[in-house]
Image: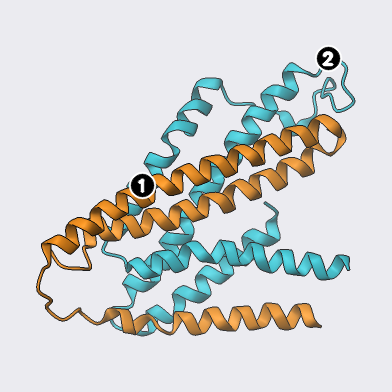
């Protein structure tokens, strides 16, 4: 019962999040382009991508090493370990995709003007 | 990734995208959510193919006498892709993701926040499945 409640409450939260959509359809008021702020935002985006890629590489390397060790100890469970490995790699990758999207916003959408 | 998780992910992505269709310019939101989910799905597909391809090749190479050997020609390891194609997938994975994200955000003008929400949908599906399995196990 508590499982269903927690899952339903999470889904309701996401549905409410989806209802915020029209707020993002508002055009931003004309803002004076601050060239310094735009330049710093682009530099920050570049560094953010580099740090995210570095962190993801470390994490994925550790995940693969742990999976290889687990399979070596218990070859019969290779299928389940493989599934857990793939799931872990995808979740790590999702964080890099977040940073990629924010960086693309700073590079091309330029929310601070320019 | 099991089937239930994929169904949860698709359901959540659709549920988040549908409210966007209620407004006149909401197609940007709906497209963004579905595009974000598709980005993570594309990444998951490529990772799964790479891992299963490499481990399939390792299984074939070490199937001499191990307990998990597939000397009998199991149906699960029917087609193992070539090394060249695996390497192409491995090294072009991030370029493809970047191009897809650029196309959706800049060319198709999808809502960027919707893209981030769309990427979150499969992650939330995994969390929901983990909660469900955790409660079932306890």
Location of residue B8 with respect to A9 vertically, above or below: above
Q: Quadrant of residue B112?
A: bottom left
Q: Position of residue A102 (x, y in %)?
A: 35, 60
Q: Colour of chain A?
A: orange
Task: Locate the C terminus of chain A by quadrant.
Answer: bottom left
Check residue B40 in the rendering and tell me which mark sits there, or answer none: none
Location of residue A3 with respect to B56 vertically, above or below: below
Pick the front one: A98 or B122 = A98
Residue at point 76%, 42% (across, down): A81
Q: Which residue is mark 1?
A: B98
Residue at point 58%, 70% (across, down): B11
Q: Report if the CB atoms under discs 2 and 1 are less than 8 Å apart.
A: no
Viewed as shown, does residue B106 lie left or right of B54?
left
- Furthest toward the top, the residue is B64
Q: Which residue is mark 2?
A: B64
Viewed as shown, does residue B37 lie left or right of A11?
left
């Amino acid at each position: 019962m508590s499982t269903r409640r927690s899952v339903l409450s999470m889904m309701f939260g996401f549905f409410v999040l989806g209802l915020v959509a029209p707020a993002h359809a508002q055009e931003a008021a004309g803002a004076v382009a601050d060239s310094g702020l735009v330049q710093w935002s682009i530099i920050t985006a570049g560094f953010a991508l580099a740090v995210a890629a570095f962190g993801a590489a470390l994490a994925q390397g550790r995940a693969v090493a742990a999976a290889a060790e687990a399979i070596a100890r218990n070859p019969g469970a290779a299928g389940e370990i493989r599934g857990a490995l793939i799931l872990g790699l995808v979740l790590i990758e999702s964080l890099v995709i977040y940073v990629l999207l924010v960086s693309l916003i700073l590079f091309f959408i330029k929310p601070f003007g320019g | 990734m099991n089937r239930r998780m994929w169904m949860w992910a698709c359901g959540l992505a659709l549920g988040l995208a549908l409210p966007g269709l209620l407004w006149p310019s909401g197609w940007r939101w709906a497209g963004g959510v579905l595009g974000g989910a598709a980005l993570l799905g594309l990444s998951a597909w490529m990772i799964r193919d790479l891992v299963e391809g490499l481990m399939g090749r390792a299984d074939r190479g070490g199937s001499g006498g191990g307990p998990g050997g597939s000397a009998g020609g199991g149906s699960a390891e029917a087609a193992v892709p070539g090394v060249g194609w695996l390497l192409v997938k491995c090294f072009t994975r991030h370029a493809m993701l970047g191009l897809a994200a650029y196309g959706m955000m800049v060319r198709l003008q999808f809502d960027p926040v919707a893209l981030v929400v769309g990427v979150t949908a499969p992650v939330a599906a995994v969390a929901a499945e983990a909660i469900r399995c955790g409660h079932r196990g306890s």
